[in-house]
Amino acid sequence: MKNIKNKLFSKEPVEIGPESGYDNYIMAIESSCDETACAIVKNGREVIANVVASQIKTHAQFGGVIPEIAAREHLDSINIVIDEAFKQAGDLKPEDITAFAGTVGPGLVGCLLVGLNATKTLALTYDKPFIGVNHLNAHLCGNYIDTDLKPPYMALLVSGGHTQIIDVKSYSEQEILGETIDDAVGEAYDKVARLIGLPYPGGPRLDKLAQEGNPKAFKLPEGKVDGYNFSFSGLKTAVLRLVKSFDGQELPVNDICASFQETVSSTLLKKVKKALEEKGYKQVVIAGGVAANSEIRKKIFNLENEGYKVFAPPMKYCTDNAAMVASCAYFNTNTFDDVNTEVFSRVKC
Ligand code: KG4
Ligand code: ZN
């Protein structure tokens, strides 16, 4: 199907995507949370430039992301990451860009506004199409970078705000089969990390300590939810009880981390396998910040021994980045064309 986008001023039609018959260079901007990122991607899969300015150090002192501070930092970094992306792209000039894409949501509104307004300004200045991108779809599209992945496939999307199993039927057609009914996986990681006294960002730190611990040290409960849905709040409460049971004595931190990680990763694996079997798919992808987790990756990659083809973005395309946004715009995965599209904070279908 043809994917026609109009240039903003001249309204000249531009065909975008795999069927356009020429090389597309999409510049994308991502600013939904605490990374200011800009990338240029050729034909949805080849990264020409990839720049990420992380705010982790700023927010670490507060134990989490402070939205107002994050928005201000995006303002400070946005022009720098755009300039740096063009530097990395060598001879490629703004005029050579096929379209400008930016994350519309979900995310922190003040943060999204900075990146999206920069995107719209670039599209208006250079008279190119504007493409608005959903951050969650962008995470899935991180799997198209440097691979030959094509739908259909089953996707496990695990981030700080979401936990979903998605049936990706085509580049633009998806069905959410199940999701968390309470905490997202990343949220559970961050909360448990805080419970046991780990500094922000908790998820990756917990992952590291888990690798030194015994995953069978403590039996923790898996959330019992029907179908493809998940629940992680009971598990979090179980860890809280476990911590309290030590009554101030030194915690076996590594063992607690390993046992928690084992419970989470087994739950995710079970539901992914169930979805693969029921739909008869042979390809599975993982995406989102938590797809960087060592044990979740290991368990999902073990499916290769059962004949499945497994995709997971390399670490730099797992956590927030703009290359995945550019790829999402190229493959037209539920994008927004209207330059008046407003940012949104929560999932919008
Ligand atoms: O996708 P992402 O960068 O931001 C959004 O939520 O959109 O994901 C961030 C989440 C955080 O909760 C962070 O703790 C978690 O991903 N995370 C991890 C790991 N790396 C990042 N959780 C567990 N293990 C990791 N290695
Ligand atoms: Zn994200």
Image (cartoon, rainbow, N blue to C red):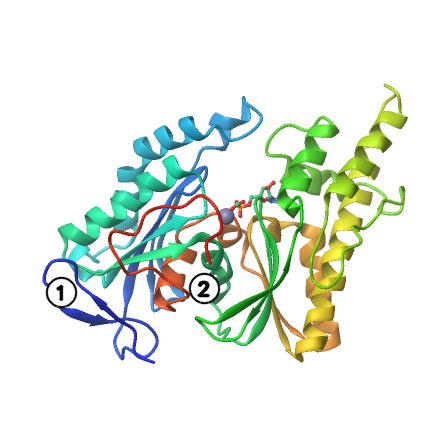
Q: Going 37% across and 50% down the picture, which residue do you hit?
A: 104
Query: Between 46 and 104, which is closer to the camera in this rendering?
Result: 104
- Residue 166 in the image: above or below residue 316: below
Residue 108, given in percent of the width and then of the height, sits at 44, 38
Dot 2 amino acid type:
Ile
Q: Going 54% across and 76% down the picture, which residue do you hit?
A: 152
Relative placement, left or right, of 160 versus 279 is left
- Residue 281 in the image: above or below residue 128: below
Relative placement, left or right, of 261 versus 328 is right
- Residue 303 in the image: above or below residue 250: below
Label 1: element kind: loop
Query: Is residue 263 among what the camera can see?
Result: yes
The quadrant where ligand 1 appears is: top right
Q: Which residue is mark 2?
A: 145
Based on the displayed image, in which of its 4 quarters is residue 130 positioned? Answer: bottom left
Query: Between 253 and 133, which is closer to the camera in this rendering?
Result: 133
Dot 1 amino acid type:
Lys
Q: Residue furthest top?
A: 248
Query: Is residue 254 among what the camera can see?
Result: no
Q: Which residue is mark 1?
A: 11
